[in-house]
Image (spheres, rainbow, N blue to C red):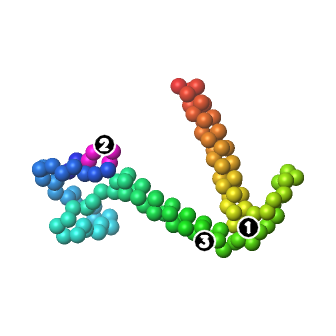
Amino acid sequence: MSYSASGDAPERTGEPQAPPVDEPAGSPPTAPAAEGRPEIPRTRTARAHNALIAGAIVLILLLVFILENTQSVKISYFGAGFHMPLGVALLLAAIGGALLVGIVGTARIVQLRRSVRRRE
């Protein structure tokens, strides 16, 4: 069996598969594949699919959080005052914090890359 460069789907060829290698005596046994079925490799597409499902679940939980915290609160920021639902205010604060961490992290990565280039 050979795999494409992208790692998405195995290409089947007429070549016979190599016999399984005996495991050392101290290693735990691995679960055998279903009878007559070869083990299906994990691909990038499968990981992306799982990540999308996890993201959808997180979004649903955020939506429930926002819908349950609808009482209006007054927000004051640098003299500007306005009202918005508590759930939305907390979500905006979390997004702002994540953006701040992302900006600082990106600056550090750029700094480290420049340092490595100078050494080369």
Q: Which residue: 50% across, 63% down?
A: 56
Q: Which of 41 and 90 is in front in this view?
A: 90
Q: Nearer the viewer, residue 26 or 72?
A: 72
Q: Which mark is residue 64?
A: 3
Q: Mark 1 vs mark 3: which is more N-terminal? A: 3
**Gap in Å between the C-alphas at discs 3 and 2?**
41 Å
Give residue 60's position: percent from left, percent from top: 55, 67
Q: Does residue 39 appear left or right of residue 69 in this picture?
A: left
Residue denoted by label 2: 5
> Which residue type does callout 1 highlight?
Leu
Q: Which residue: 66% across, 49% down?
A: 99
Badge 3, how many Cα within 10 Å: few under 14, some, many 20+?
few
Give residue 59's position: percent from left, percent from top: 55, 64
The part of the chain drawn in magenta is: 3-7
Q: Nearer the viewer, residue 105 or 80?
A: 80
Badge 2, how many Cα within 10 Å: few under 14, some, many 20+?
few
Labels 1 & 3 near each other (Cβ < 8 A)? no
Q: Does residue 100 appear left or right of residue 58 in this picture?
A: right
Circle 3 SS class: helix
